[in-house]
Image (tube, rainbow, N blue to C red):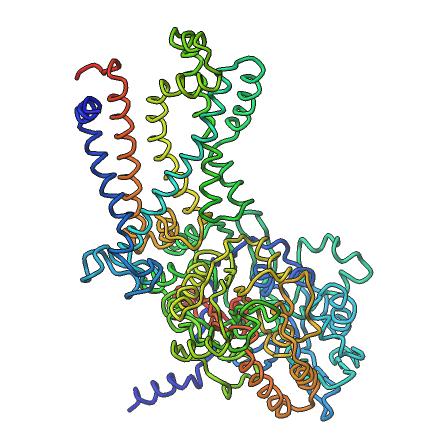
Amino acid sequence: MRNFLISTILATGLALPAAAQEAGGRLDIVVQPEPPSLMLGLVQNGPTQLVAGDIYESLLRYDTDLNPQPSLAESWEISDDALTYTFNLREGVKWHDGEDFNADDVVFSVDEFLRETHPRLRVSLEHVESVTALDDHTVEFKLKNPFGPFIGVFENGTMPMIPKHIYEGTDYANNPANNTPIGTGPFKFEEWNKGSYIHLVKNEDYYLEGKPYLDEVYYRVVPDAASRAVAFENGEVDVLPGGSVENWDVQRLTAMDGVCSTGQGWEYFAPHAMAWLNTREGPTANKDFRKALMYAMDREFVRDVIWNGFGKVATSPVSSKTNFYSDDTIMYDQDQDKAREHLEAAGYDGETVRILPLPYGETWQRWAEAMKQNLEEVGVNVELVATDVAGWNQKQSEWDFDIAFTYLYQYGDPALGVARSYLSSNIAKGSPWNNVAGYENPEVDAMFAEAAVAATPEERQEIYTKVQQTLVDDVPVAWLLEIEFPTIYRCEVKDLVTTAIGVNDGLRDAWVEK
Amino acid sequence: MMDFLKRFSRNKGALLGALILIVVVLLAVFAPLIYPDSPWKMVQRPFLTPFSTDGFPLGTDTLGRDVAAGLVHGARVSLIVGLVSTLVALLIGVPLGALAGFYGGLVDDGAMRFTEFFQTIPNFALAIVLVAILEPTLPTITLAIAIVSWPPVARLVRAEVLSLRNREFVDAARLAGLSNMRILFGHILPNAMSPIIVMASLMVATAILLESSLSFLGLGDPNIMSWGYMIGAARTVIRNAWWLSFIPGVAILLTVLALNLIGEGLNDALNPRLARKGR
């Protein structure tokens, strides 16, 4: 009976004493490629976010369901009119150099530093009227209009807190302090041996009692994918963050004894693999043809074989991991007969359709080959275009394609990461990151605009559901897969991935079982 | 002719080479009959090992495509690229070398400096650059290989013509009032044929290797199944499925070896007086 009770308690995860986590130990993590800088306020590419996510913090963290959690802000309030956000900051937080962290740092970071250096955040800050420090530990954001996604921008890579006493009045990009980043996070920068490793050590003065558990962390630079897999195999590194080894190696590594893996920790980014369909010209300008493509593809095969079962077939422009996803849309399961019917309705005359694969390695090349084969089976003539990264960028920017593979991050909210791909105002030559398909639908434009500033989540959900239904029916883009980049680690490492950005800010809670 | 065959068949290696090549050619010619479906078709579970499943003697690749079908269809590509690019290289190299050797002087200087210009750039590097600029398709790959392979032909032909142009039969032809072109193409070149044929057989082998290397690097025509592509696509899984790289590798090895053996046999057969020691 007693055993039963204990196992019940353990199983429900309740009442686990804090002493269960063991302090001490070191973690070796692969970082790929080597980050250009660790100053998260200036550089936000993947590897920088991975390493600097332990050094810098933002006001909030997000769990794997994208619910905001306390970080530097202990609590927060949103006024009923959704125009005022008030954050109560934790007291006793210190920068790594010993200075106090307070509300002035927040105002400086958001209103001065990041407004100048962070293009993605700047778009959201357009909706912000003012940022004020009410007292040392209270900050108030006043918005010009309700902006639902706003509660989602307090993520580490989106709004890192920058020390005012170091950066105020300096030339941010050339401040010598950029080489020795100072944050409030659980780990301090110790040493960077270029081309080899980045060494972080425990922040002894961290404001959470007992955390972090680890003594030190080494981010190891290993330029070749096969060598990274070997480094993990022979115990040189303990953690392979998502995407650091080829998919085929994932299978082999996760089959090893004592190796765990998880697909979680990417919910904030929710990488959405898709193929632009050129809606301006060629066969893909015809809606029936585009539907035929959707019915022709076997996306489950791709998930199972090419991605080793990781990921989820994408049914909508919004990832199921992102807020406001709706499954109340047309579902395009593979159905070759329907595909042929739609081809006929489209009056397809055998014109060759060009597929532009994503030149990011073998996985994506195989994917394009599989798509080509699927389309040829229903009678579409397909040609794969060979390209490199520069050519891929250029062909998309110049709209020189029929079908073009890509994948995009969603940042937790359709207004931040989805609308940009479908708004007619976002059609412009010269960038592969806007509405490349050239989709124009005033109705969709209006709905996206309305949903971004709608006051309540319920209203937003209603509009976003309608947007998704319209888009899925129009198919301006072939949605392929919600990609999961599995994080591979030794099972002794516990609580590594607990948030929506995974390893990026996971080391605060991670510990090693001895 | 009988003489030639007799001399050729005296070289056992050459016979073996001819046998292998005949098999490869037959497979290539009858590929659409043996495997009527596209070699890209995903037909079974991926990663089937060879000889494990009926109907898939060589197993399946990373996407469940039949390796045997890929091998047979790949033979077509390898042979076509090898033959066509050699032909094009000959069409460039032979006239250029012949003219340079026959006329000498400024023509020779011009032609040879032009040839050296190509020879100073490493073959493979130039081929990569050409394919990258032209976009990889079967014709551009063939052309690129031809462009990097003709200089040795030009030099060989020039040397042959140089040594032949002062012979008595050429003087006789000249006295008979034949035009330069007729002397060159009607009398000198036919006598220079044997080394050209031997060289051509080896060039086919080199061209196949070049095409495979390009495909291996991902610079092949993505719409065409070739041996190099098969190896390149399988290299990421070499730890889990070595045979996917091994099988097409053996195919390349055998074909190239066969062509080399044949080249040697031709050399023996066409230059009976060069009969090597020990035979």
- Residue at 27%, 21% (x, y): give it: B270
x, y percent for residue B196: 37, 24
- Residue at 28%, 59% (x, y): give it: B36
x, y percent for residue A5: 34, 89
For residue A424, what is the image quadrant? bottom right
Q: Quadrant of the C terminus of chain A?
A: bottom left
For residue A10, what is the image quadrant? bottom left
Total marks shown come to 0
Q: Quadrant of the N terminus of chain A?
A: bottom left
Up/down of A136 relative to B116, above or below = below
**Residue A19 appears in view:** no
- Residue at 47%, 25% (x, y): give it: B95
Up/down of A356 relative to A20, above or below = above
- Residue at 56%, 67% (x, y): give it: A282
For residue A280, what is the image quadrant? bottom right
x, y percent for residue B224: 40, 53
| B9 or A300: nearer the viewer | B9
| A267 or A134: nearer the viewer | A267
Up/down of A267 relative to A47, above or below = below
x, y percent for residue B248: 30, 47
Going by the picture, which residue comes out furthest to the front? Answer: B177
Left or right? Give the position of A343 relative to A451: left
Left or right? Give the position of A291 relative to A431: left
**Residue A288 appears in view:** yes
Going by the picture, which residue comes out furthest to the right? Answer: A169
Left or right? Give the position of A171 relative to B273: right
| A378 or A414: nearer the viewer | A378
Up/down of A331 relative to B108, above or below = below
